[in-house]
Each structure stands twice: as C-alpha cells, then as structure tokens.
Image (cartoon, rainbow, N blue to C red):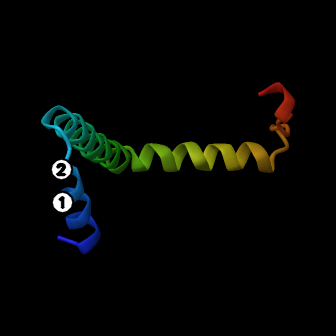
C-alpha cells in the first residue's frame, strides 16, 4: 500500500463509523464502475475503431460540419 493511501485510511479511521461506511461505499462503487468501463471499452474496441474510421472517412469526404459551441 502506498504511503498516501495508508495516510488516507488512517485519517478516515478516525471518522464516525457511518462516515467510514459512506466513504467505503463510494470507493468500492468507483472501483466497480472503473472496472465496468475498462471491460466495456476492451470488448467494444473493434466497434469503436470501425466508428472512428467511418467518421474520418466522412470528414475526408467533406460530409461533416464544424460544431458551433453556442448550439451545444
């Protein structure tokens, strides 16, 4: 465990149990979410590559237009 993470856990251990549980729940949810994104992106790599190729081809064929930030 890194020194910084160890320090964070030490400080959080001083909090009331309910606060510790809230932080632990948030951290675990974030770790699961990060893993879900990594899995999703690794499984969809070929599809994303194909979409990127299509977008580049459309741009090269002048079939795209510049976005107006005021319309976003």
Residue at image location 51% in from the left, 50% down from the top: 49
Disc number placed over residue 14 in the picture, else none: 2
Along the horizontal axis of the image, is 27 left or right of 52?
Answer: left
Image quadrant for the N terminus? Answer: bottom left
Check contact, mark 2 vs mark 1: CB within 8 A.
Answer: yes
- Circle 1 SS class: helix
Estimate how packed mark 1 is, as few (under 14), some (14 to 19) or many (20 or more) residues with alpha carbons within 10 Å: few
Along the horizontal axis of the image, is 51 left or right of 70?
Answer: left
Of the pair 12 and 33, the residue shown nearer to us: 12
Estimate how packed mark 2 is, as few (under 14), some (14 to 19) or many (20 or more) residues with alpha carbons within 10 Å: few
Residue at image location 13% in from the left, 36% down from the top: 17
- Circle 2 SS class: loop
Q: Is residue 7 above or below residue 47?
A: below
Along the horizontal axis of the image, is 53 left or right of 15?
Answer: right
Q: Position of residue 46 (x, y in %)?
A: 42, 49
Q: Quadrant of the rendered structure where residue 11 is? A: bottom left
Q: Is residue 10 above or below residue 20?
A: below
Q: Position of residue 7 (x, y in %)?
A: 24, 65
Q: Quadrant of the rendered structure where residue 16 is? A: top left
Image quadrant for the C terminus? Answer: top right
Of the pair 58 and 1, the residue shown nearer to us: 1
Disc number placed over residue 10 in the picture, else none: 1
Q: Position of residue 29 (x, y in %)?
A: 25, 37
Q: CA distance from mark 2 to mark 1?
A: 7 Å
Q: Position of residue 52 (x, y in %)?
A: 59, 48
Along the horizontal axis of the image, is 2 left or right of 63?
Answer: left
Residue ranking furthest to the top = 71
Residue ranking furthest to the bottom = 3
Residue at image location 28% in from the left, 46% down from the top: 39
Residue at image location 82% in from the left, 36% down from the top: 67
């Amino acid at each position: 465990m890194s020194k910084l993470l160890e320090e964070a856990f030490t400080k959080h251990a001083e909090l009331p149990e309910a606060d510790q549980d809230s932080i632990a729940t948030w951290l675990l949810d974030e770790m699961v979410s990060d893993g879900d994104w990594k899995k999703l992106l690794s499984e969809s790599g070929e599809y994303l590559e194909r979409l990127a190729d299509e977008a580049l081809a459309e741009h090269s064929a002048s079939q795209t237009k510049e976005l107006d930030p005021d319309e976003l």
